[in-house]
Image (tube, grey):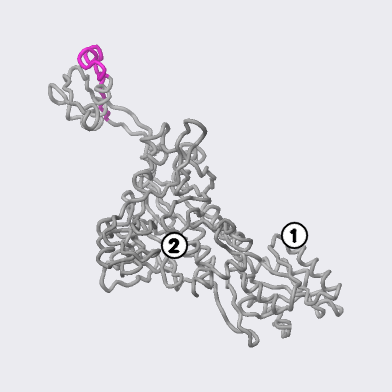
């Protein structure tokens, strides 16, 4: 399906469209219309069900604006950059790596050094997409993607819109660990907006300046916590390991999660576990698994703190797009916030039995250090304590050297060993403070929505007429059902249709009501927005001595069955939960009727 067709359908049927059109539009911002907002919400609910509720995790909602110090600690101020090249002729800015990918066979130019991307632009004589001028010789520079703001008036505190939801979880770890009673492992999820000042937004919902993430931060003890891998051991996956990407004749690896972990293709069992969970979830919500893969990050694109990273990618319009990332982040995040923040980002790990250990300590004679080192005396004493813990053998001589300060201000001092008062004593310890490691599955909700629409878009022919329909999974479809009176000039039909729609809504189903135009046109409208079931109230269902019935039409097959009205809500709820329409046909039989085009 061409992207233009999806964009046209999305706008016409109320899925999504560019924001602020009355004012010329704003690149990188999209509004979800009534159908799109419902689809997006259903995707979020399905994710919440699987990654929060079924995993026994807890969800939070943190602010979208955070102070500058948070991003100094996280490294975003220094490293959260994209490659920018600016046209000297027209002044337009572009993602340099994207330009290279568009005209070469390189799939991940983002992993290359800036100098190499600059050379590729020159070697391939890449032109400015806006004006056509050559970009050869133009510098490729780092552009920080953070949106800056001020918190408060006057001498305001600098802040930023969060570029990911994860930092809201990491920053609140000292309190969140209390809710978990300090017991590892535990997981915290969050679904919400994030902001990145993209250089060149493109591709509908694929690259936005405001977008929604669904993230899980799983906190673990790396020495003792193991994932429940047996739950997903037999899940089949298509992997694209780094070794295959770098090979001239590289191929996909079709395997199972268990085999990939056992063979070391997936380095972390925790990452393997969540790849398996994600594979099953994507199948559940309707991603076409023939157009889906997990791609391992190449060394150049993997974050410096990540031991192993994989992306879930889907094929849309001939391109592979990232829709989720899975990373083993180690203790990087919590260690950084522990160093910068004013709270403890560790947990106390209690031993099964108390341990007797030898502990090296110092008790410096401050009456000597004070006169000798003046204002540095306290720093010297602290350095002695640190050295005793790290290298007790350093105190074997008559003197010991310690360094105070950093960089150009660093100064080495010599202290008599007698003044340091070094000793080793036995102590009983009940446990130790450890910094948990983090495993992170991070999902792009908008990208998932666009993938579902692209994979669900189908055309066929019904009764000699071509139709377009969205074969969305009932769980995520914007509407559960649509109710039609076959004709509007019969008060009995319209009254029953009103009653049926009200009853279904009261049962918690999202229901559209449509009495405009021929029944065939009404079916076509619902097909285009992906409504899985249409309920038609006709005279055959209200005449006779038996219970009142309605016709239920299934979207994909266009087959119909007649269902008693008093069983309708339960029947549709079962179908939404994954029930088979074929079982319904076996129970009631198909209906041969001409209402499809009447």
Q: CA distance from mark 1 to mark 2?
A: 36 Å
State the residue lying farthest toward the left. 398
For the magenta stretch, what is the residue range? Answer: 358-377
Left or right of 27 on screen, residue 527: right
Q: Secondary structure at mark 1?
A: helix
Label 1 neighbourhood size at 10 Å, few (<14), some (14-19), many (20+)?
A: few
Left or right of 349 on screen, residue 283: right
Residue with the mark numbered 1: 506
Position in image of residue 353 (x %, y %) = 37, 36
Q: Nearer the viewer, residue 76 or 330?
A: 76
Would you say residue 210 is visible in this rendering? yes
**Residue at point 45%, 49% (across, down):** 164
Q: On screen, 368 above or below 444?
A: above
Q: Is residue 136 magenta?
A: no
**Residue at point 69%, 62% (across, down):** 509
> Quadrant location of the C terminus?
bottom right
Position in image of residue 269 (x %, y %) = 37, 56
Query: So how many labels did they put on this image?
Result: 2
Q: On screen, 197 above or below 298?
A: above
Q: Is residue 368 magenta?
A: yes
Q: Please tell me the numbered disc located at residue 276.
A: 2
Position in image of residue 156 (x %, y %) = 48, 33
């Amino acid at each position: 399906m061409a992207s233009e067709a999806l964009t046209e359908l999305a706008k016409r049927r109320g899925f999504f469209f560019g924001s602020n059109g009355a004012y010329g539009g704003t690149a990188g911002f999209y509004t979800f219309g009534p159908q799109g907002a419902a689809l997006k919400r259903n995707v979020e609910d399905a994710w919440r069900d699987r990654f929060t509720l079924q995993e026994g995790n807890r969800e939070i909602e943190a602010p979208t604006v955070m102070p500058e110090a948070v991003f100094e600690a996280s490294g975003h101020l220094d490293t959260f950059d994209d490659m920018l090249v600016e046209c000297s002729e027209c002044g337009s800015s572009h993602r340099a790596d994207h330009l290279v990918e568009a005209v070469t066979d390189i799939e991940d130019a983002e992993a290359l050094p800036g100098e190499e991307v600059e050379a590729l632009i020159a070697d391939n004589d890449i032109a400015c997409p806006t004006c056509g001028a050559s970009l050869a010789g133009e510098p490729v520079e780092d552009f920080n993607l953070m949106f800056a703001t001020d918190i408060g008036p006057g001498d305001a505190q600098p802040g930023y819109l969060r570029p990911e939801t994860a930092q809201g979880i990491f920053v609140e770890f000292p309190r969140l660990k209390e809710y978990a009673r300090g017991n590892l492992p535990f997981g915290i999820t969050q679904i919400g907006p994030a902001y990145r000042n993209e250089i060149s937004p493109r591709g509908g919902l694929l690259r936005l300046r405001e977008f929604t993430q669904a993230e899980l931060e799983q906190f673990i003890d790396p020495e003792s916590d193991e994932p429940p891998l047996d739950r997903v051991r037999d899940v089949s996956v298509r992997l694209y390991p780094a070794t295959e990407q770098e090979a001239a004749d590289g191929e996909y690896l079709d395997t199972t999660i268990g085999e990939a972990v056992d063979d070391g293709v997936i380095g972390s069992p925790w990452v393997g576990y969540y790849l398996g969970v994600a594979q099953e979830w994507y199948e559940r919500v309707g991603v076409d698994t023939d157009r889906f893969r997990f791609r391992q990050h190449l060394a150049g694109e993997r974050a410096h703190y990540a031991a192993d990273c994989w992306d879930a990618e889907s094929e849309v319009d001939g391109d592979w797009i990232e829709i989720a990332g899975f990373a083993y982040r180690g203790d990087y995040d919590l260690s950084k916030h522990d160093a910068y923040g004013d709270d403890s980002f560790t947990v106390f790990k209690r031993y099964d039995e108390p341990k007797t250990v030898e502990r090296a300590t110092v008790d410096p004679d401050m009456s000597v250090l004070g006169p000798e080192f003046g204002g540095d005396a306290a720093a010297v004493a602290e350095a002695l304590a640190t050295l005793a813990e790290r290298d007790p053998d350093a105190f074997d001589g008559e003197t010991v050297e310690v360094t105070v300060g950093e960089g150009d201000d660093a100064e080495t001092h010599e202290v008599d060993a007698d003044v340091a008062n070094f000793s080793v004593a036995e102590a009983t310890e009940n446990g130790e403070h450890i910094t948990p490691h983090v495993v992170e599955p991070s999902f792009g909700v908008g990208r998932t929505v666009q993938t579902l629409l692209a994979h669900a878009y189908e055309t066929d022919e019904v009764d000699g007429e071509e139709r377009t329909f969205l074969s969305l999974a009932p769980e995520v479809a914007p509407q559960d059902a649509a109710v039609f009176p076959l004709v509007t000039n019969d008060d009995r039909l319209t009254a029953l249709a009103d009653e049926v729609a009200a009853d279904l809504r009261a049962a918690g189903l999202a229901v559209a009501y449509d009495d405009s135009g021929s029944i065939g046109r009404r079916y076509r409208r619902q097909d285009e927005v992906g409504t899985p079931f249409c309920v038609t109230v006709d005279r055959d269902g209200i005449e006779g001595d038996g219970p009142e019935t309605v016709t239920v039409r299934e979207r994909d097959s266009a087959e119909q069955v007649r269902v008693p009205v008093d069983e309708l809500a339960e029947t549709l709820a079962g179908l939404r939960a994954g029930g088979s329409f074929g079982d319904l046909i076996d129970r009631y039989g198909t209906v041969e009727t001409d209402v499809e085009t009447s």
